[in-house]
Image: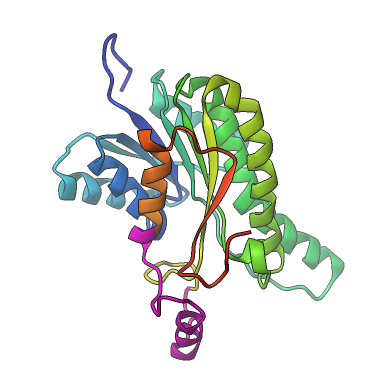
Amino acid sequence: MREQQGERRRLAVVSGGGTGIGAAVARGLVEDGFDVLVVGRRGDVVDAAARRIADECGRAGAVRAVTADLTDPEQLAAVLDAVDGRTVDAVVNNAGGYLGGPTGTLDEVAAWWRANLDANVLTAVLLTEALRPALRRPGGRVILLSSIAAQRGGGGPYSAAKAALHGWAYDLAAQLGPEQITVNVVSPGYVAETEFFGDRMTPEGHAKRVAATLVGRAGTPDDIAAAVRYLVGPSAGYVTGQVLGVNGGSVFGR
């Protein structure tokens, strides 16, 4: 995949790209003409997603799977190997999720918090820092996927971890702005059709979350992907250091 002289195919790296929002983002970027590296911990899942997206978009070879646990600095080498010297136009940090666990002792509380911070913050920091030298200058894009929980709470260490991404995004936007690289956060509300809730979601829980929106429906992965596609695209070159809420009006911007 080494970039050839005169070649202008854009390259995006999407973490957590095997399912749900990440897979929708990856597919949307392929439709927009990007080559995409889909990164995830579960090799079988990212492999299947890469094949499916390439087949559905009719772009064989445009999507590649990379298996890596982004909480482990050593495994970032697999991502850099897949980039293979190319310029990276966009990094979409979607890896993460709510991790539960026992909290009966202080040791268990510490482990619970560290697991959520690692999964949601450290993954984004390590991937972005690994790819930072390769970002296109000017014109590179960094996107962080947060959550409505960062603004209204309710998720304990998950809420805190997602809120941490906002502060880091502001710092990163200030650092990279002079090089005309933008950094933005997309903050989804309730999105159905993902693995986020696992078997925890009940019909009552779904109805409650839909009722909290102003538009009377759950979000979809494609709703979130559309926001990412805008921020990654040429029309958003003057947008940086922002948190874009995509939540059906369940939390107002602030």
Is residue 211 one of those drawn in magenta? Answer: yes
Where is the N terminus found, in terms of image quarters?
top left
Is residue 205 one of those drawn in magenta? Answer: yes
- Left or right position of 16 against 75: left
Q: Position of residue 189 (x, y in %)?
A: 50, 67
Residue 251 picture quarter:
bottom right
The answer to whether residue 245 shows anywhere in this view is yes
Q: Position of residue 146 (x, y in %)?
A: 57, 55
Q: Position of residue 16 (x, y in %)?
A: 45, 50
The answer to whether residue 44 shows anywhere in this view is no
Pick the front one: 239 or 161: 239
- Left or right position of 65 against 124: left
Q: Residue furthest right?
A: 106
Q: Position of residue 23 (x, y in %)?
A: 35, 53
Residue 84 picture quarter:
top left
Q: Identify which residue is drawn at 37% across, 70% down.
A: 193
Q: Residue furthest left?
A: 58
Query: In the rendered structure, which segment of residues is drawn in magenta?
Result: 198-223
Report how many numbered discs are placed on residues in the image: 0
Where is the C terminus found, in terms of image quarters?
bottom right
Q: Identify which residue is drawn at 43% across, 42% down.
A: 231
241 over 217 or under it: above or below: above
Q: Identify which residue is drawn at 45% across, 87% down.
A: 207
99 over 173 or under it: above or below: below
Q: Identify which residue is drawn at 64% across, 34% down.
A: 172
